[in-house]
Image (cartoon, rainbow, N blue to C red):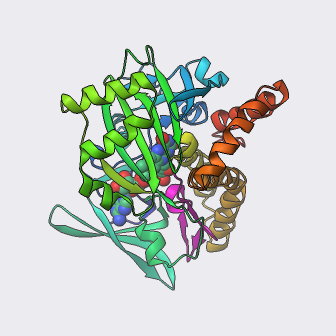
Amino acid sequence: MDLLDIAIVGGGPGGATLANIFASRGVKVALIERQKDFSKEFRGEALMPSGKEVLDQIGIDIDTENIKYRTVNKFNIFYKGTLIANPEPDFIENGEFRWVSQPQLLEKIIEKSSDYKNFSFYRGYKGQDLIYENNRVCGVKISGSNEEIDVKARVVIGFDGRSSMVRRKLNFSVKNYHQPSDVLWFKIPYPERAFPGSHAFFSLFPNSMLVCVAVYDEKMQVGWVIPSGSYGELKQQGKEKWIKFIKDKSPKEFSKHLQFCLDKNEISDPFVLKMTLDRVKKWNKQGALLLGDAAHTMNAVGGQGLNIALRDAVVCANYLLPLFKSKKLSNSDLDFAFDQIEKERLIEVKQVQQIQSRPPKFILINKFLIDLIFPIIRFIFKFKIMNRIVDKEWVKISKGFTKAKLEV
Ligand SMILES: Cc1cc2nc3c(=O)[nH]c(=O)nc-3n(C[C@H](O)[C@H](O)[C@H](O)COP(=O)(O)OP(=O)(O)OC[C@H]3O[C@@H](n4cnc5c(N)ncnc54)[C@H](O)[C@@H]3O)c2cc1C
């Protein structure tokens, strides 16, 4: 096989977008994705204006392409079943918070990339190991469809998510934010009577919380944040028991809806995911670069991970494309560019991870303290100044903390 310019391990939103940018600009790129069917991989689907901007730049207009999505236009916060706040961030009021089908979005990006002869897609091939030359990564050993292939490339990028093979093989050192929670995910039919329109809400109760979002297919995605390791016990108790626990603490109309879904057997099988939040201390090693969740694993808080991965792709392209165009591809040029990519992205990633590290810890603090804190929070938010401070944070969360514009 010819030497490629770039091999990207992982065809999630970040890897697929980066491959598309390179392919559309004449770089010889291979994208390696272990799943044949994108729906087999569970990932965040919250598309913020900051992520949409990236898709617009690669020619994917989510509003006109045949991709399922639903906008959310109301946001409420409940505590022990009582409404305590209904923030009105601009991006929600303006219908700019979209819940987008990732399998369909990824298929669309691949379809567009396939127009370029210099793009190859290894669908259903798993990156097994790295190939080295002079102690530097120069390719990936992949397997799939009963064959093994050595994909050799000048640059290898690990965009392979939270269980990254590239991170593991190169033994990157990691900063871990301890996350004391797991999330139990399931879907129910959208509770139209309880929340007419298209709502998202948080329902907080001592020691746990629900995150509920209107999603495409007339469904509601429910994430129940629970203390880590507690699912085993819940599972033993059975679905009826833990749904009853949620019901007893939820807003009344929603509670009725949950009972209705239970009776009709319309609650999807739940699955539990460990909340993970970490970051490698340096994003490149021996000529390989990590990006997206492989470099900085995001949890679901604030719906940021998908958007951050897309923005990593843009910044990476801004630095690497000029090198490939000018054929300035010495190891030191590449390593310098890798460092610049990390430096630029770290500003945003650090701020997002700071924000993401707080809620899980907060929820699990002593329940008496929570009972004390919430009335105080409600009181503070009666003052306009507090709302203005929070509004500024919403702008960053929706539009990004830094710029990530495709310049090549
Ligand atoms: C439960 C959960 C809920 C989330 N909710 C949200 C949310 O609401 N909003 C949001 O923005 N973010 C959310 N996130 C985070 C978001 O999903 C990720 O941050 C985002 O998908 C990262 O994109 P990525 O391209 O870096 O990696 P991923 O989307 O993880 O993609 C990595 C890809 O690499 C492939 N891969 C892995 N190993 C190999 C290998 N060895 N060989 C070949 N391919 C491989 C995988 O199959 C996968 O397709 C959530 C994450 C989780 C786990």
Magenta segment:
277-299
Which image quarter holds the N terminus? bottom left
Residue at the right extreme, as displayed = 385
Q: Indicate yes or no whether the magenta region holds residue 288.
A: yes
Q: Is residue 109 above or below residue 129?
A: above
Q: Is residue 208 visible?
A: yes
Q: Report how many numbered discs are placed on residues in the image.
A: 0
Horizontally, residue 17 falls left or right of residue 1, namely right
Q: Locate residue 80, reporting x and y percent.
A: 52, 35
Horizontally, residue 286 falls left or right of residue 345, namely left
Q: Is residue 29 visible?
A: no
Q: Locate residue 189, reporting x and y percent.
A: 30, 26
Residue at the left extreme, as displayed = 146
Residue at the front extreme, as displayed = 368
Q: Is residue 61 above or below residue 169?
A: above
Q: Nearer the viewer, residue 248 or 166?
A: 248
Give the residue displayed 46% in from the left and 82% down from the top.
Answer: 133
Q: Nearer the viewer, residue 245 or 198?
A: 245
Q: Locate residue 83, reporting x and y percent.
A: 57, 26
Q: Indicate yes or no whether the magenta region holds residue 92.
A: no
Give the residue displayed 55% in from the left and 28% down from the top.
Answer: 82
Q: Is residue 294 above or below residue 300?
A: below
Q: Locate residue 337, reporting x and y percent.
A: 67, 62
Horizontally, residue 101 falls left or right of residue 364, namely left
Dividing the picture into quarters, in which one does residue 236 lie?
bottom left
Horizontally, residue 46 falls left or right of residue 247, namely right
Which image quarter holds the C terminus? top right
Give the residue displayed 41% in from the left and 18% down from the top.
Answer: 194
